[in-house]
């Protein structure tokens, strides 16, 4: 069976502020299933960029997935379905940690398909990574907690650098 590029490549959108081990797991699974993955660092230029700038998030994501072939990390604005169109893919992949994620992601997937025809594929993350969220990673790092088991090494270093410079308090 042959697949054209649009069906062999998926878009994995998110803010990735920062990318963590759960994200990397979903990317690895998507790569195994589809071959090519566009990791779309989504950002709204009219809103604050978060802890890391979009460019820095992309840099950290590239380092986190450097061990994989077929991965592109790109910056995108707008809707995920618009990013999928710009990237030339027919599918979006979303990671699921729990039933709450499914509820939110299913509604979004149904809307995306109804409006654009883009389908969403759900990938459950490994059970041992299901508790990780970027928000908790940032909070743990801010207060000096151990994050090495939650994020790739380059991300842990970047987080320590941000919070060491600000003595744990970020304006």
Image: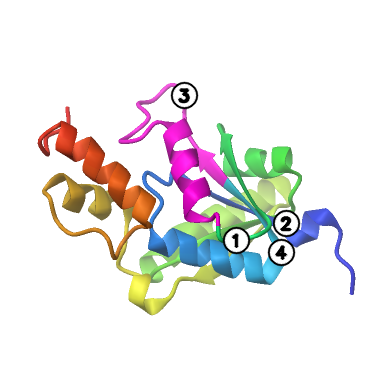
| Disc number lying in front (3 or 1) | 1
* Contact flag, marks 3 and 1 (Cβ < 8 Å): no
The question of residue 60 being in magenta is answered with: yes
Q: Which residue is mark 1?
A: 68
Residue at the image point whose x is 58% and y is 56% from the top: 109
Q: CA distance from mark 4 to mark 2?
A: 6 Å
Image quadrant where one finds the C terminus: top left
The label shown at residue 9 is 2
Residue ID for mark 3: 45
Whichever of callouts 4 and 1 sits on the residue coming sooner in the sequence is 4
Q: Nearer the viewer, mark 1 or mark 2?
A: 1
Of the 4 image quadrants, the one containing the N terminus is bottom right
Label 1 Cα neighbours within 10 Å, binned few <14 / some 14-19 / many ≥20? some
Mark nearest the camera among 3 and 4 is: 4
Using residue 145 as the reference point, say whether residue 94 is left or right of it. Answer: right
Q: Residue furthest bottom?
A: 127
Q: Secondary structure at mark 3?
A: loop
Residue at mark 3 to residue at mark 4: CA–CA distance: 31 Å
Q: What is the spatial separation of the Cα atoms under label 2 and label 3, in whole angstroms?
A: 26 Å
Check the image and name the residue furthest to the right: 2
In the rendered image, residue 42, in percent from the top left (x then y), is placed at 51, 39
- If you read the primary sequence from the N terminus, does the residue marked by circle 2 or circle 3 appear first? 2
Nearest to the eye among marks 4 and 1: give it: 1
Start and end of the magenta stretch? Answer: 40-66
Q: Nearer the viewer, residue 68 or 132?
A: 68
Q: Secondary structure at mark 4?
A: loop
Q: Judge the density around disc 2: few (<14), some (14-19), many (≥20) Cα neighbours within 10 Å.
A: many
Residue topped by disc 4: 35
Task: Please state the horizontal and vertical placement of residue 25, each as a whole percent of the image.
Answer: 48, 67
Q: Which callout, 1 or 2, points at the residue further toward the start of the chain?
A: 2
Q: Residue at x 35, y 35 (%)?
A: 52
Picture quadrant where residue 2 is located = bottom right
């Amino acid at each position: 069976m042959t697949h054209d590029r649009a069906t062999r490549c998926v878009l994995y959108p998110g803010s990735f502020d920062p990318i963590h081990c759960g994200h990397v797991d979903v990317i690895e699974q998507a790569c195994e299933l589809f071959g090519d993955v566009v990791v779309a660092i989504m950002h709204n230029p009219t809103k604050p960029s978060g802890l890391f700038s979009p460019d820095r998030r992309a840099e950290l994501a590239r380092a986190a997935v450097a061990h994989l072939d077929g991965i592109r990390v790109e910056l995108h604005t707008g809707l995920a379905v618009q990013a999928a169109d710009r990237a030339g893919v027919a599918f979006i992949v979303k990671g699921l940690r729990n039933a709450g994620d499914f509820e939110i992601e299913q509604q979004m997937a149904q809307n995306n398909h109804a409006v654009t025809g883009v389908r969403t594929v759900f990938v459950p993350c490994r059970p041992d990574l299901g508790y990780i969220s970027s928000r908790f990673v940032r909070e743990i790092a801010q207060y000096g907690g151990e994050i090495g088991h939650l994020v790739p090494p380059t991300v842990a270093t970047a987080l320590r650098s941000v919070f060491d410079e600000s003595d744990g308090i970020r304006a």
